[in-house]
Image (cartoon, rainbow, N blue to C red):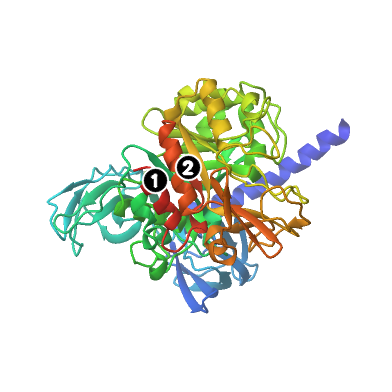
Amino acid sequence: MRFRHRAAAGFATLLLPLAGLVGLASPAHAAANATATYAKTQDWGTGFEGKWTVKNTGTTAISSWTVEWDFPSGTSVTSAWDADVTSSGTRWTAKNKSYNGSIAPGASVSFGFNGAGSGSPSNCKLNGDSCDGTTVPGDAAPSAPGTPTASDITDTSVKLSWSAATDDKGIKNYDVLRGGTKVATVTTTSYTDTGLTAGTDYSYTVQARDTADQTGPVSGAVAVHTTGGGTTPPPTGGDKVKLGYFTEWGIYGRNYNVKNLVTSGSAAKITHINYAFGNVTNGQCAIGDSYADYDKAFTADQSVNGAADTWDQPLRGNFNQLRQLKAKYPNIKVLWSFGGWTWSGGFAQAAANPAAFAQSCYNLVEDPRWADVFDGIDIDWEYPNACGLSCDTSGTAAFKNLMSALRAKFGSGNLVTAAVTADGSSGGKIDAADYAGAAQYVDWYNVMTYDFFGAWDAQGPTAPHSPLNSYSGIPRAGFTTADAIAKYKSKGVPASKLLVGIGFYGRGWTGVTQDAPGGTATGPAAGTYEQGIEDYKVLKTSCPATGTVAGTAYAHCGSNWWSYDTPATIGTKMAWAKTQGLGGAFFWEFSGDTSNGELVSAINSGLS
């Protein structure tokens, strides 16, 4: 105990001179008499050189300096000179070296760095105050302005008005965003946007900036349709749901962007999009791929509205592209899907506290930066109280409790849906959880009526991965679309809340000699991205269908054997779905279709 008291006393004596130094050069005093300015001195495409200059604008010397700023996700400092640069998340801090901390009145010092990415700094502070030399009384960013209202709409213009944002430092100006892209900066609470196209849908939001150059969250969105021109007709097919999954990673190797929904004609033939996937981790909903979701800059030719993303716009990535798509096709609703095969392991922890999980999901989906993009949430838990990539033992009631909490949090104004198992076997996955009890909380279930059979059974027998009904020789009873739908109905799930699933891909084996299903194999057939699986757009020409079984197609070409749906078999399944009174259909996923969207067209026409 004696040594502990002595150590504490020694530490206390050290604090006294340090406290005195802080008082002599307080951050507020120093920054109010100094400025920091930034310049990009070189840019080589994949990186750049930046320089900060700190100037003493006061009448007394500055003994030390610290510059802080934010870089957008994807932009970073890779090396620096004449300052010690560190980071915490997207916040970067530069402190003077021992030889350049002192700055005489009227003098300045500079430090430089090499950077990666294309972003520029924001929210700069010098010794705790604004870099423009003004004292910052607090750190709060501005509030979101009120949702704009539209008036005086013509063929080519619209007047926007909004209620003011609030801020402890005062509002400096507002950015007006059209489809997520900044079109104007104004100091008033109104703006007239001109040069628009007649008969076209637009979406507008507003974002405030305070006198310390901090930007707040974007406002709610207002949809505007200019007069004149033509209109985009809604999809045919009555009130049937026609939903497709859009994968966040499709923009990489597959080079499939949101714009492809427009160029293929698919956007005019669907009602809903599931954006896949958000992560489920630590009992919470989380971002899956931040770069793809809201940071990637799309070029003009990749963008739905034909305009290139800029470095300073508040929202980029797939989220902004989906916002542009909704402005062009206002009938489309977008849900954010969480989980999936890879990230379903996180649901066990989420199920332990459903209310906390629902709150985390709501906070993420309704984040002001992209709240207008999403119309609800979809849960893809593979599988409650059963085994998928991992095994869950949360209990029969876990799924019902989770969906109840989500509905309570998201309310009746948002869609709440779930992708569910199609295992209709006795004692199978449908029997493992209370899907009937949970049905009262969901708008619909996406019944995953595909992947029944595949080359994970490397030696076969070959079998169609998405059979509509049973057939002689099927490897496992209950593994059909009809069995799954019948089982949900028998448990009390309304038919109108069940969507039939279509895979826009095939599953296949190699080493097969038999044309008909039931043949032996030596392993999975080669695929572009994964063994044993291939997109329809490839298979339709590389291995055309040679027969049908159980309402779906199969193909034997060389030693390979594939099964997949074609426009004709989709037509059969859609006709069946209508006779069953189902709520519609969904598919996985857009990029597997042809460039003219022939499978989406088959779903649309089949449900009409």
Q: Could you tell me residue 410's position as x and y percent?
A: 43, 30
Observer-nearest of 558 and 237: 558
Which residue is depicted at the point 42% across and 58% down? 597
Which residue is depicted at the point 55% across and 74% down? 46
- What is the C-alpha distance between the residues marked 1 and 2? 8 Å
Q: Residue furthest right?
A: 2
Observer-nearest of 116 and 409: 409
Residue 200's mark?
Answer: none
Q: Is residue 240 left or right of residue 427?
A: left
Q: Could you tell me residue 188's position as x and y percent?
A: 21, 52
Q: Could you tell me residue 173's position as x and y percent?
A: 29, 55
Residue 606's mark?
Answer: 1
Three-letter amino acid code of the residue under disc 1: Gly
> Can you say which quadrant of the picture contains the C terminus?
top left
Q: Label 2 belongs to which residue?
A: 573
Residue 402 seen in render: no
Dividing the picture into quadrants, the one containing residue 181 is bottom left
Which residue is depicted at the point 53% across and 51% down? 565
> Can you say which quadrant of the picture contains the N terminus?
top right
Observer-nearest of 285 and 536: 536
Residue 456 seen in render: yes
Q: Are marks 1 and 2 in contact (CB under 8 Å)?
A: yes
Q: Is residue 275 left or right of residue 559?
A: left
- Position of residue 456 relative to residue 48, above or below, is above
Which residue is depicted at the point 67% across and 49% down? 517
Dividing the picture into quadrants, the one containing residue 414 is top left
Three-letter amino acid code of the residue under disc 2: Lys
How many numbered circles are shown?
Answer: 2
Label located before the other in sequence (1 or 2) = 2
